[in-house]
Amino acid sequence: MKIVESIHEMRDIAERTRIDGKIIGFVPTMGCLHEGHLSLMRKAREEVDLLIISIFVNPAQFAQGEDYDRYPRDLDEDIRKASEIGADIIFYPGKEKIYPDNYHTVVIVEKITNKLCGVSRPSFFRGVATVVTKLFNIVRPHKAYFGEKDYQQLVVIRKMVKDLNMDIKIIGIPIIRESNGLAMSSRNLYLTDRERASALSLSRSLNRAKEMVDSGERAAERIISEMKSIIESGRFTEIDYIAVCDPEEFEDVDKIKERVLIALAVRIGKTRLIDNCIVEVK
């Protein structure tokens, strides 16, 4: 496995790989790799000739006062895990290479970024779309892999790729959970033992929502009320949002008639966690 820090070198490798007729797979990450990331890499390893992952903590998606400076970083451990999976390249650019002096260009996906996480984090998806566009232009993948835990992000990236005519297949991979149901996230490392116990209310509330729909409940308001009660029964919890919505445009749904996204964001102490599930009427 090779670590590449130079944009020029990464482009040269991608160009030669494409000339040779080989398929490039790409998993963009911010590092601190966990089983969720590794599931993306395993899927990519099955499908592509050259597997590239990036490790870049993107400052553009952190608002002032968020956790950019303390975001978990462990390059040595990331290298070990990526090597065990069989990644070919870790693209590891410095901040000054991705955002040089006098950088002024951003990528904005409208409408669908104004819902859910976009309400409390209005600059987040602009930062994500910008850095992913840059990484796509450098790595030039045929396929890119994203986790469904960040469901809104996945939809935003798919929309961006379609709207900008990028010739890249975006592949979503199901949420990987800990044995207790907690969705895997690098930010789980922030949680104390007591906060971790409270964080289990997120997956419990989603499981309850699915049970209600399966039992015939169709009123989003009653489902959200039940989920809110479960989450607020735990300590350290502060709800950002709970939504029952269309899974493509994220418009709220009053009555569940078909496939919907149930999504939430909750602060556990100082740590903001997200989770979701797709529910279909049987």
Image (cartoon, grey):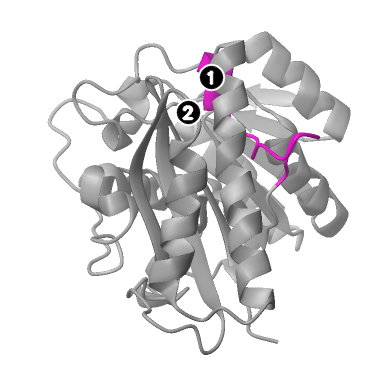
The spot of residue 223 in percent (x, y) is: 48, 66
Question: Which corner quadrant holds the C terminus?
Answer: bottom right
Residue interval drawn in magenta: 176-191
**Earlier residue among tags 1 and 2:** 2
Frontmost residue, 220 versus 61: 220
The spot of residue 230 in percent (x, y) is: 52, 45
Question: Residue 249 got which mark?
Answer: none
Q: Residue under circle 1?
A: 195
The spot of residue 41 in percent (x, y) is: 75, 43
Asked whether, in this view, residue 143 is left or right of residue 198, the answer is right
Q: Residue at x 32, y 75 (%)?
A: 251
Q: Residue at x 75, y 37 (%)?
A: 38
The spot of residue 174 in percent (x, y) is: 70, 56
Q: Residue at x 76, y 28 (%)?
A: 82
Q: Main secondary structure of the magenta part?
A: loop
Gap between marks 1 and 2 measured at Cα: 27 Å
**In this rendering, does residue 141 appear at all?**
no
**In this rendering, does residue 177 appear at all?**
yes
Q: Residue under circle 2?
A: 56
Frontmost residue, 62 versus 188: 188
